[in-house]
Image: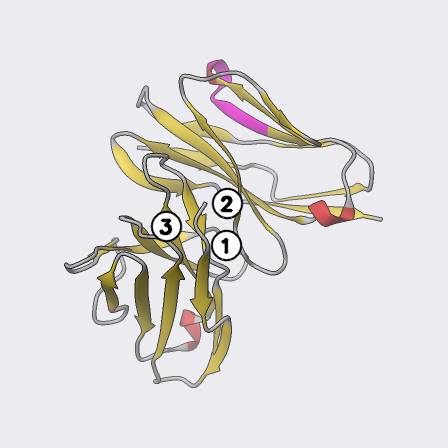
Amino acid sequence: SAVISQKPSRDICQRGTSLTIQCQVDSQVTMMFWYRQQPGQSLTLIATANQGSEATYESGFVIDKFPISRPNLTFSTLTVSNMSPEDSSIYLCSVEAASTDTQYFGPGTRLTVL
Amino acid sequence: AQKVTQAQTEISVVEKEDVTLDCVYETRDTTYYLFWYKQPPSGELVFLIRRNSFDEQNEISGRYSWNFQKSTSSFNFTITASQVVDSAVYFCALIADSNYQLIWGAGTKLIIKP
């Protein structure tokens, strides 16, 4: 399985500011995903990060609020913009191992918005 | 539409007891994949197992075993001789061919008391 790292691991931010989360994979992967996990909840897919094109967002998530970059096959960023306390969550990136339909996850970023 | 149900919100057992986590799924697809993930308190999601719909063989890996029964649409997970380190939230998930997105159960929080 791929080794996935995320930065930062945690952050405490003020309302109205933005935070960019980085996801780095140790091998080239086609499919990368960003998830949100609110406290005590299951995972919700935010978007699929597409290399060389705009991300594909799920219902309820918009590019203005969660802009995503995917400059190459090993790296992606998710920005949480104009944050409010409701954005306090764990944000996870995942990658799909080729031809296995299996997603492997990064360690997550714990975000607290005050 | 696909759905995954983990009816047990929280289970608490004493160390060395056996414990079974239930997972019931719904899909009309004939080709699909089922997964279990573990999320310890640190927050990272750890992949445990992937099973495709054409393989109903039960699987054992050390103290972990999985019972896949298509007749009851269940994919249950048993931990034998539980240990404190097994304390985590466990998620069951499904990907069906017609909708290539992980559908997550709500998770079961497992507490192993020493």
* Picture quadrant of residue A6: bottom left
The residue positioned 70% from the left and 45% from the top of the image is: B86
For disc 1, the marked residue is: A41
State if disc 1 and disc 2 touch (CB < 8 Å). yes
Query: Which chain contains the residue that carries disc 2?
Result: B
For the residue labelled by badge 3, is the local secondary structure a helix, a strand or a loop? strand
Magenta segment, which residues? Answer: B71-76
> Could you tell me residue B22's position as x and y percent?
59, 31
Q: Residues within 10 Å of mark 3 (few under 14, many from 20)?
A: many
Looking at this rendering, what residue extends furthest in the left direction? A53
Which residue has dot 3 on it? A95
User: In this rendering, is residue A67 above or below B91?
Assistant: below
> Would you say A8 lies left or right of A95 here?
right
What residue appears at the point 62 percent right and 53 percent down from the top-left corner? B40
Alpha carbons under labels 2 and 3: distance apart: 21 Å
Mark 3 vs 1: CB contact within 8 A: no
Q: Which residue is mark 2?
A: B106
Residue type of the residue flagged with mark 1: Gln
Picture coordinates of residue A1, whole percent (x, y): 45, 45
Mark 2: secondary structure: loop
Name the chain under label 3.
A
Tag 3: residue type? Val
Whether marks 3 and 1 lie on the same chain? yes
* Residue A106 % position (x, y): 46, 57
Q: How did the renderer colour the structure?
A: secondary structure
Image point (46%, 73%), residue name:
A8
User: Does label 1 lie on the same chain as label 2?
Assistant: no
Mark 2 is surrounded, within 10 Å at the Cα level, by few (under 14), some (14 to 19) or many (20 or more) other residues, namely many
* Of residues B28 and B90, the one drawn nearer to the viewer in this rendering: B90
